[in-house]
Image (cartoon, rainbow, N blue to C red):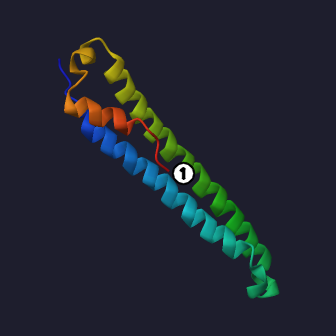
Amino acid sequence: MTIDVSYLEVASRSRDWDQQAVDLRAAGGQVDGVGGATAAFTPAVRGAVSTFCTAWTRHVEELAAGAEERADGMRDAIRDYLESDEATTFLFDPAAMVLRGALEERR
């Protein structure tokens, strides 16, 4: 049984996961910013707003960390492919050069 993998597609999806982590952290920062400005809320809800914002920010950070882990795992797969004996014959292959460029994390 053979499984074909498009490593260029893997590289593209790893960048998508990187962007997902960036977007999640930005959203978490916005929610955290609301939690830091509880004076805008009535005293009756300030505590609940603060608790919600803290919990939501923590949750979003966990999601962002998971997205980073997925991106890193995909880059590891590309690295393994490029370092394998089979891939050494593709040293100057344009696709392999693109994949090498995809090994750099961009966040």
> Which residue is labeled 1 in the image?
63
Residue 45's image quarter?
A: bottom right
Residue 91's image quarter?
A: top left
Q: Residues within 10 Å of mark 1 (few under 14, many from 20)?
A: some
Residue 68, image x, y percentages: 50, 44
Q: Secondary structure at mark 1?
A: helix
Quadrant showing the N terminus: top left
Q: Residue furthest front?
A: 92
At a point 62% along the width and 65% down the height, the residue shown is: 29
Q: Is residue 67 left or right of residue 9?
A: right
At a point 61% along the width and 53% down the height, the residue shown is: 61
At a point 47% along the width and 36% down the height, the residue shown is: 72
Residue 6, image x, y percentages: 22, 34
Residue 41 shows in this picture: no
Residue 55, image x, y percentages: 68, 61
Residue 100's image quarter?
A: top left
Q: Residue furthest right?
A: 43
